[in-house]
Structures are given as C-alpha cells and as structure tokens.
Amino acid sequence: MVHCMIDKIMLSDRSKLLYILVLVSSMLCLSAQPIYAGTGIISMNEDRDLARVHDHVITLQELVSFAKGAPNFYSHLQVPGGPEKILEEMIWRRLLVLEGRDRGIPEPTEDQGGMEVYIHRVLKRLVPELPPLTEADVRTFYEEHPEVFSTPLMLRVFQIKVLIKNGDVASAIARIESAKQALIKGTALGDVARMYSDDSFSRDRGGELGFIPMEKIDPPELEQTLRALAVGQISEIVRVGQAFFVIYLVKDRREPILDPYEQVADAAREKAKQDHRASAQAKLRRKLENKWGVEYIDPEWKPINMEKNP
C-alpha cells in the first residue's frame, strides 16, 4: 500500500516536471519566432522605441507583450505589415484612455472588465450612435463600392521569394537576381523556385501559391503589382519592406462578379453603417492625435497612407 502511494507521488512529480519542461520549451519556441515588420525580420527578443503617445513611449517589447496577451493580434507578428497594425491599435487605445481620463469618464475595476471595458466605454461616449441610413444612402454606398459586393478578383499566383536574412540585403539581391536571370534564359519557373526560393510552402509546389483573392493584401503596393500582371507575365523584382524580395507570375485570372443589389441590400445597409462609423472614428483619431501628440520615433513604422489622410 505504501509502495503504491510512493509510486503515485513519484509519477505525479514526473508529470509536473514534464509539464514544466514542455511549458518552458513552448515559451522558448515562441520567443525564437521572428517578427515580420516592414523594417525587416526582427528577433522577438530585440527592443527599440517605436512611437510616443503624449508622454508614453511604446517599445517593441511592449508591442510583443500586448500581442501575446491578445489572441486576435498575436498572429500579426508573423505577417508582413502585421506588427505595424498592432502598433496602430496600441496608439488608438492609448489615445482613448488619455481622452477618457481627461473627461473624467469613470474607469471600471479589473473585476468589472478592466481596460478593455473602459476603452469601449470611452469610444461609445465619444462616437455616439449615428442617424439611421436612408434607402438612398445604402444604394449610393453599394454603387460607390462595387468591390465590396463582388466576388474578388482571383489570381493563380506563382512566386520565387528570397528572404533578407540578418539584414544582409546584398546577398538577397544577388540571389533574387540569379533567379531572374535563370528565368530570362528560359528555365521553368518551377525549377527556379525549387533552386532559389526560401518559401518552403510554394517552393515544394514549383512556386505555386494557388488562387489568391485580391483583397486586403498587405502592403497595398503588392496587390497593385499582382493586379497589373497579365496572364503569363513574369513580374519585375518586387521588394516588400525590409523583409524579402519576390518575383511573381500569374497563370490564370477569374474576374469579379457583382451581386445584384436586391440580393445584398441587407448586407449593403450593414456595410454602409460600418463605413460611416469607421469614418467617424478616423475623424476622432485625427482630433485626438492633434490634441495629445503622436510621434513615430522609428519612421519606418509610420503608416504609408498617413500622408494621404491628414
């Protein structure tokens, strides 16, 4: 009986030890993953100042910590342009908190929902309910945004991707140029992809990514490049931030098809409401930025379209 209890205790201790080892291993694995920022591939252990909101400086490590605690944002760390979106969300939240406290809006306790509830409370106070949309408003939105109510343009895309590793731009350029020359000499793109591409998923399929919908692709310049390619045309070398160089080939196109208004009237009304609210929030953000001050300490993290929306 005693031996049996000792065995159970020892087994329990082994289980705890195994659990701790797995947990530590998982944490080390997560910390080793890179961040695909527009400035290049960054170690998750690195730190730098990114932006200042009023008197608070947002650092890279603060951004990583925020993303790890927010499941909706964590995956953005491994997507080119994703870390910049996380930074914009953090700036927006801090502006709302500053304005809420300045206006004396009461903060909930942690038991009442903490900062998440507070941000929603402030936003609701600062952006009240908008007036109901008329049928004419909804139809106008539908007519002005046909891409929202159409099937997306689908392109069958092939690629050769070369990563910029450890900031070595020269080596990446030399490698992608060699791939380009091989294509010019008539080597099949699939063979060139297997030889030069750093993207294992497409490389093992001869460079093929499959059919990709042309919507919400970051950065927008990349989508513009793909849309402009004729079927069978190989692109020039495309540089995506400081992360990688790519050569693209489009082998097939499926053009968008617009849904009739009658079929999407309800969806159009909801989309129009969302658009009006987003416009109101964008206007509020510009107002709060002017009041509290936002500075991008690292200019590479400044949104590309910021100059277009003063």
Image (cartoon, rainbow, N blue to C red):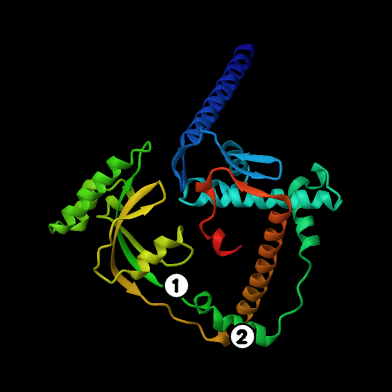
Task: Name the quarter where the N terminus is drawn.
Answer: top right
Residue that mark 2 sits on: 139
The image shows residue 10 at horizontal and vertical percentages of: 58, 17
Q: Earlier in the sequence, mark 2 or mark 1?
A: 2
Is label 1 in a helix, a strand or a loop?
A: loop
In the image, residue 117 above or below residue 19: below
Judge by depth and name the residue closer to the eye, 207 or 94. Answer: 94
Residue 207 relative to residue 300: left or right: left
Residue type at mark 2 is: Arg
In the image, residue 188 above or below residue 15: below
View extreme (top): residue: 2
- Mark 2 to mark 1: distance in Å? 20 Å
Q: How many marks?
A: 2
Q: Nearer the viewer, mark 2 or mark 1?
A: 2
Residue 177 relative to residue 111: left or right: left
Task: Name the quarter where the C terminus is drawn.
Answer: bottom right
Which residue is at 35% across, 65% downward? 226
